[in-house]
Amino acid sequence: MASSQQLNDFLARVERRAWRQAQYAVRDNEHALDIVQDAMLKLATRYADKPEAEWPMLFQTILQNTIRDFQRRAKLRNFWVSLYSKFAGNTAEDELDADPLNHLPHISPSNPSAEDEVDQQQKMALIETGLTLLPARQREAFLLRYWEELDVAETAQVMGCSEGSVKTHCSRACHTLADWLKERGVTL
């Protein structure tokens, strides 16, 4: 059985990446933080007694389910707000723009030039914008496979779908992102 210190260390390692996943999904910093905290609490209270090797998959499953639950609740909440606004004669407020995303850490040469740094930051900003444009399942599959580096079977398990679906979602996400970046003159 793992110790509480091992669980704390695991959660510290996955916190930032989990927050980014949630941020991509819900496009709100505070809600993303709440989602990650909920997922961490669920892992700690329900699965802390599981072997440490199982935590990464359990946590990804919990995180993705928590994101989906939040999205379902938000959809229902937005439905009722718009319905109320319609009958009350109010106009719905414009959706607030999401805060700009922070840049992902990237691998660069040991002494990159300022031009290389700026170029890399611009590419990352475009990729992050492109990720927000993907449908939710494509974005989820893409992030789990290429960011979290889960294999196809693990991704399918987390997403609750077949391995073929994972491959399809990833392929579509890659093609969409590549086309979108190409339209903007970006080559990777």
Image (cartoon, rainbow, N blue to C red):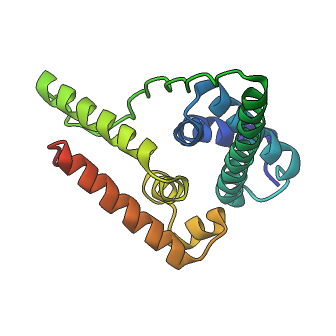
The relative height of residue 65 versus residue 71 in the rendered view (above or below) is below
146, 84: nearer the viewer: 84
- Tell me how many marks there are: 0
Residue depicted at 87% across the width and 50% down the height:
46
Picture residue at 20% right of the left edge, 33% below the top: 110
Residue 80 quadrant? top right
In which quadrant of the rendered image does the N terminus lie?
bottom right
Q: Residue at x 47, y 60 (%)?
A: 145
Q: Nearer the viewer, residue 140 or 44?
A: 140
> Is residue 4 rendered to the left or right of residue 137?
right
Instruction: Measuring from the top left, give residue 147's x and y in whole percent.
Output: 45, 51
In the picture provided, is 93 more to the left or to the right than 165? right
- Residue 136 pos. (x, y %): 54, 52
**In the rendered view, does 159 fall on the left or right side of 2?**
left
In the foreground, 12 or 87: 87
> Residue 184, percent across and down?
19, 42
**Residue at 68%, 44% in the rendered image:** 71
155 to the left or right of 31: left
Q: Quadrant of residue 7?
A: top right
The quadrant holding residue 108 is: top left
In terms of depth relative to the viewer, which is nearer, 29 or 179?
Answer: 179
Residue 87 percent across, percent down from the top left: 78, 30
